[in-house]
Every structure is written in structure tokens, then in C-alpha cells.
Image (cartoon, rainbow, N blue to C red):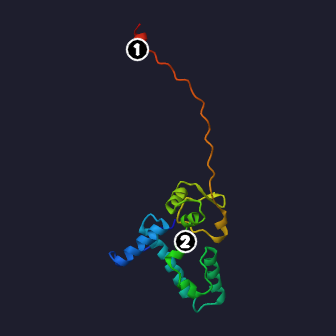
Amino acid sequence: MKRKHKSYSKPRRPFDKARIDEEAVIKKEFGLKNKKEIWKADAQIKKMREKAKKLIGKAEEDQKALFERLNKIGMDVHSIADILALEKQDYLKRRLQTVVYKKELAQSVKESRQLITHRKVLVDGKVVNKPSYVVPVALEGKIKVKPKKAKAKKTEEKPVKEKNKDEDKE
């Protein structure tokens, strides 16, 4: 079994006021649990940029394959310059949590996160309970909320009469 590695890196300057304010705005806009989720998105964008830089001098087919892969997950890229211009907000917009909110299946981003973690959201008929799931463009139209089940009516049971203590002693 492969060892799991950390999928993000902490900022170099932990108390940079501008970065903290920017992350607070992003966290609120996308309804994220903590700043680690922002750092993970940033790491994913960084990986995409590194792959694009490696492909600058390579064959056209390799570049097309990368563009196609990124277009499948909803990143609108047609050149290496487009990949290098991607930002963490572009990646965060493709998360299931944000897509559920944008499709108006939930009234707020926080509610969409709750629906997802409570296993109420179906993607292509399958339950997905990870708010960070990156939704492919092909599956974006297949996102639904589970229908609520009608509660079965309970038959009323007659209360059992308890004997008085006086009756027991006699």
C-alpha cells in the first residue's frame, strides 16, 4: 500500500496580513472548513502549472492531452498560457460543494457542504460525500439531491396501565 503524503504546503510567512485577509474572503465565499482546503487547491494549481511548464518544448499531442484532461474537469484552457494563468479560485469553483450551491440545490454554500457530508447528494446516481470532489463537466448535469422519504405513520399504542402500589400490597 502506498504511503499517503501531504497534499499541500503551509505558507512560508504564517502572519502575512494580506494573505490572511485574502484567504478569509476565499474561505467565506466558497464555504470552506479551514484554510488547509485553500492550500490544497493552491497545490493542485501548482501541479498543473508545473506539468504545463514541462510541456513547453514537447510534442503537440502531449499538450493536447493535458488540455483535454483539464477541460474535462472544467478548466477552460486552450494553451499553456491559459494553464499558467489559472488561479486557486478556478479550481475551487469546480468542487462539488460550490457546484451544488451554484445549481441552487442548497440555499447557502455551508448548507451544500452539510448536504454532501450527510450523504444527501447524488452524482450520476452515486452518493458522493466529499465536498472537495472535483466535478467533471460531463457529470455536472447529473447532480441531484436525494428525495426525502415520507415518514411512515406510527400506530398509536395504548398506554399500559400501571398498578397502584396500594393494589400490589394487598
Residue found at x 61% / y 87%? 79
Q: Is residue 156 above or below residue 149?
A: above
Residue 86 visible? The answer is yes
In the rendered image, which residue does mark 2 sit on?
A: 93
User: Is any atom of residue 6 visible in this view?
Assistant: no
Q: Position of residue 2 (x, y in %)?
A: 51, 67
Q: Is residue 57 above or below residue 138?
A: below
Mark sitting earlier along the chain (2/1): 2
Q: Where residue 45 appears, x then y in whole percent?
A: 51, 78
Query: Residue extending furthest top?
Result: 170
Q: Which is nearer the eye, 97 or 5?
A: 97
Q: Does dot 2 land on a helix, a strand or a loop?
A: loop
Seen at 38% across and 77% down, the residue is 19
Residue 93 in percent (x, y) is at 55, 71
Q: Residue at x 44, y 68 (%)?
A: 27
Relative to residue 108, is residue 162 depicted above or below?
A: above
Amino acid on which the number 2 mark rests in the picture: Lys
Crowd band around label 2 with a 10 angstrom C-alpha radius: few (<14), some (14–19), many (20+): some
Q: Is 155 situated left or right of 160 in this image?
A: right
Q: Residue at x 56, y 54 (%)?
A: 119
Q: Quadrant of the C terminus?
A: top left
Where does label 1 land, which residue? 165
What type is the residue that disc 1 sits on?
Answer: Lys
- CA–CA distance between discs 2 and 1? 68 Å
Image coordinates for residue 157, horizontal then vertical, percent? 57, 26
Q: Residues within 10 Å of mark 1 (few under 14, many from 20)?
A: few
Badge 1 marks a residue whose secondary structure is helix
